[in-house]
Amino acid sequence: MKIGIVGAPNRGKSTFFKSATLADVEIADRPFVTIKANTGIAYVKVDCADSFFNVQCNPRFGSCINHKRFVPIELIDVAGLIRGSYAGKGLGNEFLNDLREADALIQVIDISGSVNEAGEKVEPFSYNPSEDIEFLDFELNMWYYQILRKGWDKFARQVKQEKASIIKALHKQLSGLKVTEEYVENSIKSLKLNVETPESWSDQELMNLATELRHKSKPIIIAANKIDIKGSEKNLERIKKEFLKYKIIPCSADSELALRECLKKDLIKYIPGENNFEIISKELNEKQKAALEFIQEEVLTNYNSTGVQDLLNAAVFDLLNYIAVFPGGMNNLKDKDGRIIPDCFLIPSGSTALDFAFRIHTDIGNNFIKAFDVKKRIVIGKDHKLGNLDVIEIATRK
């Protein structure tokens, strides 16, 4: 599971990345601080299965706080994209290639409009953040179009001569972008393209196909960053109405980073994604207390969270439509090392018990006999579709 953090220069991408991962990356109020992509581990938050059984789990990966399970995912923070990135401007091709393996994208915009297109500071609300959303959509679509268009005539003729399936051929060509065969088939059907004559598809039809495939393989959610700047809520409401096809979540990456750093230093108690925290240290000075008070009143109270955790969760569970499933035993929730409910897997919605078995290990899938829904204490078959927060035991041939 890989989520890309994208956007124009100096919008707060690296702050968002650091607030989610606490990775040691440079943050500065100037464009192009990030040149090479940063990768790190962030976490989505789900209700832990341990509360159902009145036990405390011991995760192998991630953590569990007050029965909230934090499951690891990978974040990729790429350098700021500029107009013409798809054509190589500003090392754009290199930056876009860093996104090839991303399953979904979080676009960070400056909702206060205090940074212009080039990433330079301007008066708040003097720049329209709507332009960032339109520009990135265009750049990504053109990136896909260029890959698709390059050598298309020869490719299409060869497919026809070999009497091959254009759907399978396109899937093979674009699989490095996370384009599935299903995405190709559905896009071609939606656009009513003739699969028998791909050599006759026009440039506009190829552009439409590239756009469809990009939207399916790199869906985007918008982080409306710097919502803590007074007046930004007006921009937020306007942009929500303007871009109905996008999920747009208010965000203050600076606030989340401050809270995570305080949590790391045992200054506060805080569960990421919650709307409050508790000061537990007497070592805070007045300036630090004032900063925390501002975060509570202007961000957490007004927007119910800093938005960072909400965005991570929305990217995985809303955009990608994944669910969380726990391996467990009908008579024993512990693994061989004594850890209680140690694992939690993120799998696509609609996955079956057999899919889950293969997700755990190929040998378990190959030797699958049946499965058990541990919460309901019933036997389920290999084709049974799993639900979010299910606890499943797999029975295998010895």
Image: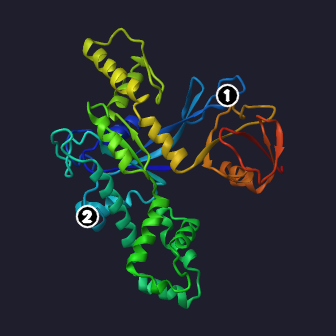
Q: For the residues carrying marks 2 and 1, which lies nearer the camera in this image?
A: 2
How far apart are the alpha carbons under marks 2 and 1?
50 Å
The residue to which callout 1 is attached is: 50
Is residue 369 toward the left or the right of residue 357 in the image? right
* Residue 84: numbered disc: 2
Q: Residue at x 59, y 66 (%)?
A: 182
The residue nearer to you, when weighing 211 against 361, is 211
Q: Residue 363: where, in percent of width, then height?
A: 73, 54
Residue count near mark 1 (Cα–Cα under 10 Å), binned few <14, some 14–19, many ≥20: many
Name the residue nearer the viewer: 192 or 170.
192
Q: Quadrant of residue 25?
A: top left
Residue 336 higher or lower than 380, as above or below? above
Question: Secondary structure beneath disc 2?
Answer: loop
Give, as a three-letter code, the residue at label 1.
Answer: Asp
x 70%, y 27%: residue: 52
Residue at position x 72%, y 26% in the image: 53
- Residue 155: x and y, percent? 46, 83
Q: Position of residue 8 (x, y in %)?
A: 28, 51
